[in-house]
Structure formats: structure tokens, C-alpha cells
Amino acid sequence: MKKFKFYKSLKFRIFFWMLLIGILPGMAFRAGILKTYENKAVSNRRIDILSQAKILGTQIVTYDYLNNTSLDVINAQLELLSNIYDGRVLLINSNFVIVKDTYNLDAGKAIISEEVVKSFKGEEISKYDSQNRYIEMTIPLTDSKTEEILGVLLVSVSTDSIEANYEYLKDNALVIVVACGIVAAALAMLLSQRLVRPLGRIPKSIDEVQTGEGEEALSISDYTETEAISRAFNEMIKRMQVIDQSRQEFVSNVSHELKTPLTSMKVLADSLLGQGEVPVELYKEFMTDIAEEIERENKIINDLLSLVKMDKSAGNLNIEAVNINELLELILKRVKPIAQKQNIELVMESFRPVTAEIDEVKLTLALTNLVENAIKYNKEEGWVHVSLNADHKYFFVRVEDSGIGIPEEDLEHIYERFYRADKSHSREIGGTGLGLAITRSAILMHRGAIKAHSKVGEGTIFTVRIPLNYIA
Ligand code: ADP
């Protein structure tokens, strides 16, 4: 397991690739140089032998050596040629009979090889057998006057000396390649450790930031990449801190909101219990107050449950095509009794029939909250206008009231959980501070938007925009 991990490490990869880059060119260079040397040496040897053989050939023809092989001058030269190049020279006459063999083995024998036949037709043939390490050449001997081919010179020489040099070079080059490899390995080891070190510091620094032991933020500025990682990490930590803080605030708000009705109930109950003889009227009055507080506690819990449901089921909407005109009519019908109690006129205006793909339960809750607020934060004898319109992409619901309005500085906060612009009024009329948070969540789940305009003392307008077709 440990070995496997090592192979996967960046340190090993850098080491491996650097080593390869260090060694491969040396090896390729070695192979290339050796091949070039061999080719060049063989070609030089051919040229040498050819020129020597040609000179000799001219002399053979001139002295008519083919018919008189006892000529010492030529014999000496033939011996010299075969000695220098560690080879054998055969002289063949037009009857394909070997008239001279420097090895003195085959003189007098006939030879009809492909090369010899070709040479009698005028071709100069040269052949390199790298396996058996020799060069064989057949050269026609031509009478310069008659252009007649009188004989063929067959020279075969060993390339052992070339091979010996080749082997020597090969060994030397290997030493150089190995030396380069060792240097490359050492450098690769050093560099891989150096290059990876800043990355190795990241987990430790992250641990320190998390436990609060080291610096407050991650800062590894060795490379642009580690700087980017540090920046991204710090931003993530900041975002998490904000989330954590808002979570804590929410928990403390919830506790506070839930405790308030309980405290009231406790005070009411204690004061009843503390008195000896309590008149029935007082009992009734206190019990009514207690029932109201229970009602309030119930409302807060219900709203909290709605909010949690909105958060949880973000991808879990129950979408269907709904007639929005009817949906709004129904909402208005339900809240009508509350409006009538405060003598508030409730008017609905539909500019066109609208059908949209929505989650009926969630959107009803959202719009009911807006209309209820418009009634709750209104004046005696005030009015609430609800209108519905649409274009090709969205439908728009406008809820306008003649109420108390929302101060400018509160407008951006009204969607926050438990936020109340007018604290005493909200509490008095039984608000939980959660209504608009629920409304906004539901609208955002439908990929919609909500906006509020308000003037203190004159009234408020909420505009909701929702796509006609649900966008997943
Ligand atoms: P609440 O339960 O207190 O009504 P909401 O979240 O519904 O909570 O509203 C937040 C606050 O915004 C309210 O306490 C109130 O101060 C203000 N508000 C909301 N709607 C209106 C409105 N139509 N007119 C005036 N103030 C409003």
C-alpha cells in the first residue's frame, strides 16, 4: 500500500521524468554515433580498397599478368594488398578460372558466382556482410584499348578492426551514459524534493489554520499555483465562517423566539399560583393570555417547519401546470375575513389568464404571506391591490398596500429570518419575522425574483416575477 502511494506521488513523478530526460538523449546519442561511425568506417574502407584494386587492375592488364602469374612485381603488390587489409585476393580469367589466390588454396579452380558473372558484364560490385564482418568486392579488369573485360579481381577483406573500434567506442559511450544517468538521478532526486516541498507544507498549514495554532490564513507563496490554492482555501474558510456565524445566529434567534411565549406563560401561571384566592374573571383573563401565547408558539414552530422544508427540498418541487388567476382568487378569498375585520378593501386585478408550471403549495404560501403582510401592516380603512400580468416568459404578481411602509434602511433586511422592521407592531399582531424569508425561498426555488418598494406612511409594493415554464 505504501509503495503504491509512493509511485503516485508528485515527487516520484518529477524524479522519474527528469531521470528519463537525463538518460534518454545520451542513449539515443550513443546509438546514433555508433551507427554513423560504422557506416563511415565501412564506406572509407571500400573506397580505399577500390582505389588500390583499380591501380592493381591496370597493372595486371598492362603486364598481362592473367597469362603470366609468376610476375614478382604484381605478386608482391597482391600480397601487400591482402596483408594490409587482412584479406584475400582472387584473380579470375575470362574462363572463370582462378589464376591467382593470395591464400594459395583455390588457384586453378573454376568460380562461377553471381557477382563474378555480373562483373564480367562490366559491373563493379561491393557487398558488406556485417554479420560475418567482411567486405567483398568484384572489379572487372578492362583492356583500355579494346574495352574487353579480360578478368575479374575478387577482393574480400575483414572488417574486424572496424568492429574492434566499434566495441571500444560502445564501451566508452556506455560509461559516459551511465555517468550522465547518475548525475541526472542525483539532480532529479534533489529537484523533485525541492520542487515538491512547498506542496508538502500545505496540509500542515491547513491543519494549523483549522486548529488555530498557526497563522490565521493559509499563505504559501512559493508558486503561483500554491498562491492560488491558498487564496481559494482562505476564501472557503471565510465563507464557512460566515455560514457558521449565521447558523449560530439562527439558533440563538430560534431559542429566543421560542422562549418568549414560554416566559410569558410562566409569569402568568406563577402569578395565578402565587395568589391565594383568585377571582374566576382573573383566571379566565390569564388563561386567555396563556392560550394566546400557546397559539403564538405554535405559529413560530409552524413557520420554522415551513422554512426548513423550503431549504431541504430545493430540488424536490412538486411542479405542475396551475391556473395562477384561480390561485390568487383563492388566496384573497381566504384572507378576506382578516381584511374585513380591519375594514380594508381587497381588490384583485387580472390583466390576462395565466397558467404556469409551479409548486402550488409552496407558491400559495409565499403569496399568502405577501397579502397577509399587506393587510397586517395597513391602516384602518386602507386598501390592498393585487394584480396579475404576464409576458411570453414570466408572470408578475404585484401586491400593493396603503399601509405604514418600510423604512429605507430596513428594506434590504426584511427577507432575513426573524427580522422585523417594526418590532412592537409585528409582535402585537402575532408576526414571527419568518414570513418573508419563507416567501423569498419559495420564489427563488422557482428561479424567480422578488422586489420591494416602499414609502413610510404611504404604503408598500411587492413585485414577484416567476418563469412561466419551470427551469430545473
Ligand atoms: P412578520 O411575521 O413580522 O410579518 P415577515 O418576514 O413577514 O415577518 O416580515 C418582516 C418585516 O417586514 C415585518 O416585521 C414588517 O416590519 C415588515 N413588512 C413586511 N411586509 C410589510 C408591509 N406590506 N408593509 C410594511 N411592513 C412590512
Image: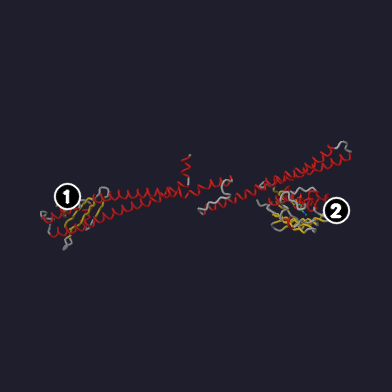
Question: Marks 1 and 2, how far apart in space?
Answer: 139 Å
Q: Nearer the viewer, residue 98 or 14?
A: 14
The answer to whether residue 305 is seen in the rendering is: no
| Secondary element at image label 2 | loop
User: What amino acid is found at the position of numbered circle 1 in the picture?
Assistant: Ala
Tell me where residue 198 appears, x and y as whole percent. 50, 49
Q: Which residue is tagged 1?
A: 110
Mark 1 vs mark 2: give the one in front.
2
Q: Which residue is tagged 2?
A: 343
User: What amino acid is found at the position of numbered circle 2 in the picture?
Assistant: Asn
| Secondary element at image label 1 | loop
Tell me where residue 293 appears, x and y as whole percent. 80, 43
Left or right: 238 as drawn, with respect to 383? left
The answer to whether residue 393 is seen in the rendering is: yes
Q: Disc 1, disc 2: CB below 8 Å? A: no
**Mark 1: few/some/many CA within 10 Å (<14, 14-19, 20+):** some
**Mark 2: few/some/many CA within 10 Å (<14, 14-19, 20+):** some
Q: For residue 235, which numbered disc appears in the image?
A: none
Q: Nearer the viewer, residue 156 or 17?
A: 17
Q: Which residue lies at the image location 21% right of the left edge and 51% below the top edge? A: 157
Tell me where residue 178 appears, x and y as whole percent. 35, 48
Q: Which residue lies at the image location 87% right of the left edge and 36% below the top edge? A: 276
In this view, the residue farthest toward the top is 276
Say whether disc 1 or disc 2 marks the residue closer to the N-terminus: 1
